[in-house]
Image: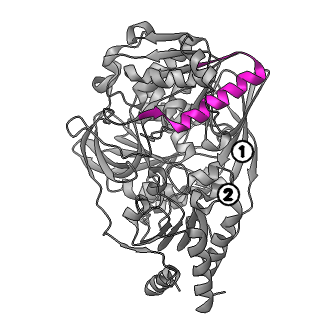
Amino acid sequence: MGLILIAAEVAGGSPSPLTLELVSHARTLGDEVAVVVLDPEADAVLPALGAHGASRAYVGQERAYREHLGQPAAHVVSALVDRVRPALVLFPGTQEGRDLAARVSARLQLPVLANAIDVTGDGDDFLVRSSIFGATVDVVTRTRSRSPLVLVRPKSFTATASGGPPPVTEVLPLPAEAPLGARRLESVVAPSAGPGLEEAKVVVSGGRGMQEAANFEVLEHLARQLGGAVGASRAVVDAGWVPYALQVGQTGKTVKPDVYIACGISGAMQHLVGMKGSSHIVAINKDPDAPIFKLSDLGVVGDALKVVPALIEELRARGLS
Amino acid sequence: MKVAVFVKQIPDPTGVGRLDPATHLLVRDGAELVLDPGDANGVEAALRVVEANGGEVVAITMGGERAAEVLRKAMAMGAGSAIHVADDRLRGSDALATARVLAAAVARSGCELVVAGTESTDGYTGTVPAAVAELLGWPALTFAKALEVDSGTVRIQRQTPAGHDVVEASLPAVVTVTGAINEPRYPSLRGIMAAKSKPLELLSLDDLGVPPDEVGLAGAGQEVISAAPAPERAAGELIEDDGSAARRIADYLAELKVI
C-alpha cells in the first residue's frame, strides 16, 4: 500500500499522544510509515516516533512553525506530499491539524476527510469511518484520489511501540517565499488543578442543567471525592461559566474514562462524540427524553442540583470526604 | 471596510438528522431548516467589526433555493447585502469544492475580511474557512473567542487547550469564531422588514468561473459507501429520582470499584 505520511505534532518535548496513535495505526496500512515534524523541538521527538514505527522523518525546526499559524507548515507539507506522493496522509484531528489539512487540501486540490474514527485499506483506496449525528450513525467513505488527507479523532487507535530505531531523517528547509501569515503574539495559560481531563479515570461533567457557574463547585467536590476531573458541555463553556480547557466534545477534548458522570447535560451531538467511548456512563437530567439517556448505563431522571449534593453526602457517609 | 460572513442553512440541530438511504446525502426535506447557530455568532462578530470600523457586512451562502432564508435572517440581524451561490451542479459538493465556490464569491465581493463559524453544526468538517484562506492566499485566524480589527490589523484571542493565544495578522484575512465570542442579537421587527428590500445577488457557477466538473458529486474525491446506525450501547437502567437516586449511583460506583 505504499507510504503513509503522518503530520506529527509535538507537545511538551514529546510527540502528542494522538500522533503516536496515528503512527502506530499507520503500520497496519502501508509498507512504510513516514512522519513530517515541523517544530523547533522536532529532534527530540524522533526516537519516540521511530519506536512506534516511523522509519522516515521529514524535519523542519524553524521557529516560524510555532510563531505562525498554518501557512508556513502548509507550504512545506504540500511540497512534500506533491514530491513523495504518499498513499495516504493522516493528520491529528486538532485545531492545528485541521488548519493544516485544510490548507494542504486547497493547495494540492486533494480531498480532505474529517472526524475519522477508523481507517482501513481497500485495494488501492482507503475506507474511512466517521460517526455523525451524535455518534448515532456510522458513515464509511471510500477515498478515490491520490494522497487523500484524513483528519483522525483522538483515541480512535491505541499507541503501541514497535521497537523501531530512530527514523532516517531528511531536513526540509522553509523556503524564503513561504508566506508566514498570522502571528502568535503570546500564549496565556489558564490555571488548572487535579488530574488532566484526558487522563482521568472518572470525569464529572456539567451542562446547562447546572443553572449557573457557581454550581460547578459541587461538581468539583464530587470529582475530588472520586479522584476525577471536571468536564463541561460546550454550552456552558460558551456561556463563560468554565474555561474551554474543560470542554468535552467535538471541538473540545475526547475522553474515555472508566466512568463518565453527566450532570445536567442533555447530550447534543457535538458533546456525545467526545465522551461516548467512556466505559460506563451515568447521566442525571430532568428531561426523560434527553439524548444522553440513550447512551447511559445508569440514567437518573432528576435535578442534578439535588442529586449531586445528595451523592456527595452519600459518598461522605461511605468514608469519602 | 467590507466584511463577508459565511452562513449555512442546516436542519434544526435539536432534531434528529437523517441521511437519504440511496444517495447518503443529508435529508433536508421535512426537517425544519435554520441558520446554523455557530454562524449566528459569525454574523454578530462581523456586525460588531463594522459597527466599530464602519463599512458593510455581506452575507454569503452556497445552497439550494431555500438557503436564501438564512441570508434574509443575516440581513435582518444587520448585514447590508447578500450573495447566494445556487447551482444544481453543486449538489453533493465536498469541503474542498465548497471552499472553491466560497473563495470565488469572496474575491468577487471585494471583502477584505471573512468571518465564519469554526465548523458547521450538521457536518462538523471544519476545514472550509482555512481552505478558503489558502485559496485566496490569506492568513486564517481560527478558533477566535475575541476579535478586534484596527487600522488594517486583525487580532484575536484563539482558544487553546491550555487557555488562549493572542494572534495577529494584517488584512485581508479569514477569522473563524467559536460560540464563546458573543451572544448573537435577535433580529428586530424593523430589521426583518428592512431585510426584505436589501440586495441579494444570485450567482451560478458560471458567474463565478468555477468549473462544474470540480464541484458537486462529480468533483468529490471520495464517495460515501455506507451509512448505518452506529452499534448501540446496551440499554441502561433508567430511574426516576425519588430521593434514593444518590444511593443507587453510589452503589453503582461501588459495583464498578470506583469507590
- Which mark is drawn over residue B165? 1
Q: Are marks 1 and 2 on the same chain?
A: no
Q: Residues within 10 Å of mark 2 (few under 14, many from 20)?
A: many
Residue with the most extreme top position: B207
Find the magenta span and give its range: B33-58
Residue A129 position within the rendered picture, expressed as x and y whole percent measured from the top left: 32, 49
Disc count in the image? 2
Q: Does the image show residue A72? A: no
User: Under tag 1, what secondary structure?
Assistant: strand
Q: Residues within 10 Å of mark 1 (few under 14, many from 20)?
A: many
Residue B118 position within the rendered picture, expressed as x and y whole percent measured from the top left: 55, 38
User: Which residue lies under the disc numbered 2?
Assistant: A242
Q: CA distance from mark 1 to mark 2?
A: 17 Å
User: Under tag 2, what secondary structure?
Assistant: loop
Depth check, front residue: B47 or A127: B47
**Which label sits in the foreground, 1 or 2?**
2
Q: Is residue B31 left or right of residue A59?
A: left
Residue with the most extreme right position: B151
Amino acid type, residue under disc 1 in the picture: Asp
Q: Chain of mark 2?
A: A
**CB contact under 8 Å: marks 1 and 2:** no
Task: Give yes or no for residue A75 being in the magenta stretch.
Answer: no
